[in-house]
Amino acid sequence: MNLTDFINGISSGAFDDKFRLLYGSSAKNLMRQKTRYISAAENFSKLYPECSEIRIFSAPGRTEIGGNHTDHQHGCVLAAAVDLDAVAFVSLNSENTVRISSEGYSDTLINLSDIEVHGDEKGTTTALVRGILRKFREHGTDIKGFNAYITSDVLSGSGLSSSAAFEVLIGNIIDRCFNETSVGAEKIAKIGQFAENEYFGKSSGLMDQMVASVGGFVFIDFHDIDSPAIDTVDFDFQNSGYSLCIVDTKGSHGDLTDDYSAIPEEMCHVAQKLGAEYLREITEDDFYSSLPDLRKDCSDRELLRAAHFFDENNRAIIETEALKNGDTEEFFSLVNASGTSSAELLQNLFSAKTPLKQEIPLAIMLSKRLLAGCGAVRVHGGGFAGTIQAFVPSYKISDFKNEMERIFGENCCYVLKIRSVGGFELTL
């Protein structure tokens, strides 16, 4: 497809069904996406005027529904892809070079003959791309050079995992351009996690990448990390009279790496004292019966975080069943219980390094006041700073959004739809 075909296709409505699949049926939203894609096409053309043939890819952000900090212990999670995404316009080149221009970020330029770890790249987009290239090469992929322009409305720091959306996007470009999709969604997710862990330098589980790659509501059991059990759930919050909201409290994510890394490290320390590598290998009864001995070697916070894992892991399973049964009352009760556990046991609502900065507890307090016993609210994602998640009755959405934005700033409240597909290529 060339740029002219794409622009004509937008004008003629040829992409309308695909846009509805990705972004919902709202006429206003459809027009916004058409404008967004045309702008991205124009930016790509300015960067690479010699490239007429293009391919277009999309990968979604994700929202964690249940299972806060369980995936890295090979536990269970419930999450969903959302209608905010990263979009890439791509063309091949003959220069053995990957060039990526991302709106708002420095350009990435990688020679395909050099895809080993660069220590000075830790924490950069270039590190992520280099790691993804390395893992695809190990899978036997004959990667050629390509140019990409990327635009994303999965804002960094929004708690919707912009990094996973980016990783899955790059993975889909490589898999579809050079593999005829033979690697597939699950392996693309694992490749993204590898790049984030080994090249980017962030210890993370597999949930974010897996949900962005698979799409829809996804229950994942990571007991067998090499072959996680995946189950999809068909549920529509809007038809049930509720909307899913993510509120960005605008707290800084700077200097939080140690806070995030401490949770899996502390949980693993408890598991190791019980002769295992991860908490999933330990029974809840064994954990509680061993508490006197565990206290000799483990801190009280480590034990509280381990207790959170056992409860939260079970909650993710029961939440999934509640959604399958359409039991929103049970589901919301579990979400609220998850929020309490995260606050009291997991302790990831604010950083102990900056105890006076408590945007997440403030947002949760205000949300409970506004919801007045309806719906549910809890910390969202990794925690410590960033976002909360709320399930808000549809008739309260306007008041909820207005109050959150009055306190935390304009455009801080995202009213989201669940996206049924993960990594995706738009074709005529």
Image (tube, rainbow, N blue to C red):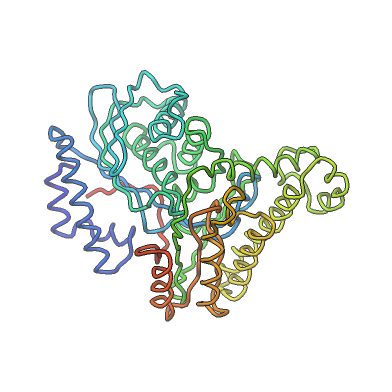
In the depicted view, which residue is nearer to us: 295 or 79? Answer: 295
Q: Is residue 87 above or below residue 247?
A: above
Write down the quadrant of residue 401 in the picture: bottom left
- The total of numbered circles placed on residues is 0
The picture places residue 273, in percent across and down from the top left corner, at 80, 39
Apparent side of residue 257 relative to residue 307 in the rendered image (left or right): left
The picture places residue 98, in percent across and down from the top left corner, at 30, 28
In the depicted view, which residue is nearer to us: 184 or 203? Answer: 203
Quadrant in which the N terminus appears: top left
The picture places residue 244, in percent across and down from the top left corner, at 46, 67
Q: Residue furthest top?
A: 113
Apparent side of residue 281 relative to residue 330 in the rendered image (left or right): right
In the depicted view, which residue is nearer to us: 157 or 91? Answer: 157
Write down the quadrant of residue 93 in the picture: top left
- Name the residue at 52% across, 37% down: 202
Apparent side of residue 282 relative to residue 101 in the rendered image (left or right): right
Q: Is residue 353 above or below residue 31?
A: above
- Name the residue at 36% across, 25% down: 142
- Name the residue at 56% across, 38% down: 203
Q: Is residue 393 above or below residue 353?
A: below
In the depicted view, which residue is nearer to us: 383 or 178? Answer: 383
Apparent side of residue 48 relative to residue 333 in the rendered image (left or right): left
Q: Is residue 331 above or below residue 395?
A: above
